[in-house]
Amino acid sequence: MSITTLPAETLETILICTAVAGHPGTIATFAQTCRSFRALVYNAVDSHLWREIYLSTFDDPRALRFVDLEFQWANNFQQYIEAESYMRQHCQPVRVKKMYNLRRSAPTTMFADLPIPEDSTSIVRALDGLLSAVHLSAPVSSPVQHLDTIPLTHAKTLTQAWLCTPAAPPTVLSEHPSLNLSWFASALAHGYPASLTMQFAGLELDRARDEEPATQALARLVCYTGFIPLASREDPAPVRAPASGSPGTRRSLRLAPPADGTPPRVLDLSADAQRRRTRVHARERVFHLHYLLRRRHWGPYRPVPPSPPPGASASAAGADADSDDDTSDEDFVPREDGDGDEDGDGDDGEGEDEDEDEDDAELERVRHRPRKRTIPRAEQLRPDWTWLAAARVIVEANIREKKALDSAGIAALFSLEALREGAWPPVREEPREGDAQEDDEKEKGKTRLDEVDGWDWAGAEGVWRRCVCWLDYNDLIRFDDEQLMEASIIVPLRLRIVGYGPPTVAAYPDRPTIIVEGEIGGAHWIGNDDDDDDDDVRRMHGTVEMIADGNVRWRLYSNSPHDDGANEWVSEGVQLGGVGSATGVLGLWTGAMHDNADPLGPFWTWKVA
């Protein structure tokens, strides 16, 4: 019997079985054999075949509550398989060779053959496929059973909430582990492409590439997985090196000799050395004081380009947004004497070449024009994943090194399963005793607060833990010191919902702004007694809202210990993974008044009850 005589239903079942068996490429090969088979695979009247093929390997995206999409079964399946193929091909361990010195019998260096960087379009498509698989992983089927959070968040002291709750998020236990995340872990078995990994673990930090799509996509993945060192394998064939070879290392990459005649540098490719360099570069990003800009809303967001003034072209405004010159920043205050004249003598460009290009002249006018000091709106903000990835590296290293959590807590916090939507299910408010009077007061204040009816879609109310890291001012000049250690502390945080505001992004009308207040442990938190009177407890308030690209923004203020009404610190964070994930919120803290000398640092907050 010829295969062409089989019924279409039988052929479809065979194709689905090939996907289940782990041979999805067979489907494309089968479609190339004849026109009728191609029509069966790619020109079907509906999507039932590709839906079954997709669901044989990945989670059903229709179960997601907070993802609105018109799902393309065939396109998504093909993108994931292409991403897996790309990672398998380009993420193999780097081959290193031992180099022997003529005067020594022991190997002195090991050369590495780093692959040539691939086409950026292919890299971006592969990384986007990995990210899509994480974002479309199935929600937790057995969400965390809430403790009675009313006494913890409304009645008991912060110290009692601290003592009555675990230090780490609960392990995500689901009847059905995510197929997407299992596939994701398999695709990353050998880490990330070498050329991208070296952007984090190379000798130098190249900020010029931070805005590239591939860098942002990889950084977002690092936020989810942590840094994965580049794998290497030794080539058994030794190579003889000259007598003046470089000092020995375990696994290293010898770089080209510098032009000034200094000895060539050797890049150690051992996993520990890669982590050390990554942490040094992470410090350079995270604690860089000039990172705090109005255009970033003083948070871990990409700069929002200023609006072009009347008569200026969009290209000039865009060039202005990309410029690192201080005068191109929205926070720059132009001089009154000459309004942009460099020396204040009133000569504002006289004597310049009359044939200067008009675009350059327009760019100069844009750079030196007076600015309207506007703050970006929520619908304009997009996370800066390079900064957030560096924050993850810093906080994770401190948690592991200082054993702030036990092994089970570390496994729960850093688990891929913790990224799934709904580990902390959203809560619809139900009436409580004594709420009638509160409702009357809310109704009276709704006009003032611009409140609306809402619900806790983000799972904000409850008890949290917060790990905060910082550096002393004296340490800010020695980022490259591998012996440098950040200060860190884990403190309790509890939040109560006091109202709701209008949605900040029109695309998400069902997610109103959540208005919260509560308490947080300060830098001198102890937490040993049941009474808060003798402990460092700060008042906290803020909002949870959506931003431009569908991420969840957490903005929280804490007060000064000497003045209950004055804000001292502000935190800007982004939810990792799905809405209500156990992974929590990663972000930046700094001074609430945004003074020039304000410090900054990373924090990680996760819910425990």
Image: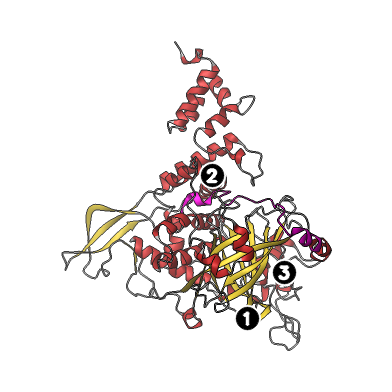
Q: Residue furthest bottom?
A: 345
CB atoms of marks 3 and 1 within 8 Å: no
Q: Mark 1 or mark 2, which is nearer to you?
A: 2
User: Tag 1's secondary structure?
Assistant: loop
Q: Amino acid at mark 3?
A: Ile
Q: Earlier in the sequence, mark 3 or mark 1?
A: 3
Where residue 294 appears, as percent x and y from the top left, is 67, 71
When asked about the image quadrant of residue 275, the answer is bottom left
At label 2, the amino acid type is Ser
Q: Earlier in the sequence, mark 1 or mark 2?
A: 2
Q: Which residue is mark 3?
A: 375
Residue highlighted by disc 1: 596
Q: In this rendering, does residue 32 appear at all?
A: no
The residue range painted magenta reads 415-441
x and y percentages locating residue 465 in the rendered image: 53, 64
The label nearer to you, 3 versus 2, is: 2
Which residue of the protein is positioned furthest toward the top in this rendering?
1
How far apart marks 3 and 1 lie (CA) works out to: 17 Å
Is 63 displayed left or right of 395 in the figure?
A: right
- Coloured how? secondary structure
Q: Is residue 154 visible?
A: yes
Could you say which is closer to the camera, residue 450 or residue 526?
A: 526
34 on left or right of 69: left
Question: In terms of depth relative to the viewer, which is nearer, 490 or 191?
Answer: 490
Gap between marks 1 and 2, in whole Å?
Answer: 47 Å
The residue located at (64%, 24%) in the rendering is 45
Quadrant where the N terminus sits is: top left
Secondary structure beneath disc 2? Answer: loop
Residue at figure coordinates x 47%, y 45% from the top left: 184
Question: Residue tagged by mark 2?
Answer: 142
